[in-house]
Amino acid sequence: MKELTDLQAHLDNAIDWIWKLLPNLVLAILLLIVGLWVVKFLNRMVRKFFEKKDYDQTLETFLQSFISITLKIVLFVLVVTQLGVKTSSLVAMLGAAGLAIGLALQGSLANFAGGVLILLFKPFKVGDFISAQGVDGTVKEISIFNTKLTTFGNQLAIVPNGQLSNGNVINYNAEPIRRENYTVGIGYGSNIKTAKEILLQICADNDSILTEPAPEVYVGSLGDSSVNLSLRFWAKNEDFWQAKFYVHEESKLRFDEAGIEIPFPQRVMHSIK
């Protein structure tokens, strides 16, 4: 009988606790629903604000992500407080949780710090074509923890900001023009002067190749089976690839017309009878 009495007492206490908690629980749920709607609304307003202003797109993306996460953290604190958790206890709990999470997510914190460094020093921005961490692509988005690149094949590459801020990054759009160093080999029996004139004429025939700085051709090296000519020309970033492919194709076609040999590896087989 005593055990049944104790059990009934525990059930009564549990029911009383639930009834006391129920109003706060309902308010917390309502606060969560309304809060999420408000956060979504504020994020939309922030996005519209940035669209009206001529801010750097890199800054826009980063701040939008940061504001969204901050608002959700504030909402979490308000909901937990509504459930009856004391502020002092919540601060202590968040401090302990923050320490544990910080130790567990050191990489994420490094990525966040890397994102801040990228935002401050701007080694690249949205729209730049970069090469970093073995990936080549156009910067699509810079968020708090990572940077998204669109590769040549239209794949999405996600690179952590910590690696980008600490590693080597080549920004091909940092300067308005780029130089190509094109090497082509000709046979030792071919006329070097004629080959150089053809390469310079190819550059002159393409409006995408700049005349200043002027294209230059040098004998880069004397190989085992070829004289290697080095053609250096400049083009604007937006015209670079078209000019590069044009020179590659035209050099082959015009060398063939002029009878200039482009050596290639050959294997001679001898049969012994």
Image (tube, helix red, strand yellow):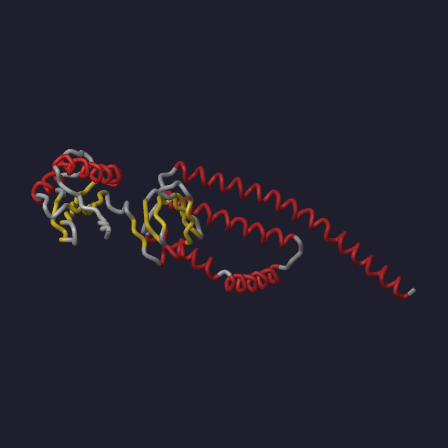
Query: Is residue 68 or residue 160 the one in the foreground?
Result: 160
Residue closest to the eye, 253 or 219: 253
**81 or 10, which is in the foreground?**
10
Residue 17 can be seen, yes or no? yes
Question: Relative to 18, is 103 on the left or the right?
Answer: left
Can residue 56 be seen in this snapshot?
no
Residue farthest along the right direction in this orientation: 1
Of residue 56 and residue 86, the one placed in the foreground of this image is 56
Total labels drawn: 0
Q: Quadrant of residue 155?
A: top left
Q: Residue 240: x percent and y percent? A: 24, 40
Direction front: furthest residue: 273
Q: Residue at x 58, y 64 (%)?
A: 92
Image x and y of residue 190, in percent: 10, 44
On the rendered image, what quadrant is the N terminus found in? bottom right
- Taking 158 as reference, is 53 above or below it? above
Q: Position of residue 186 (x, y in %)?
A: 15, 45
Q: Is residue 237 left or right of residue 198?
A: right
Which residue is painted at 40% across and 45% down in the image? 141
Left or right relative to 26: residue 37: left
- List x then y, in percent, for residue 77: 58, 54
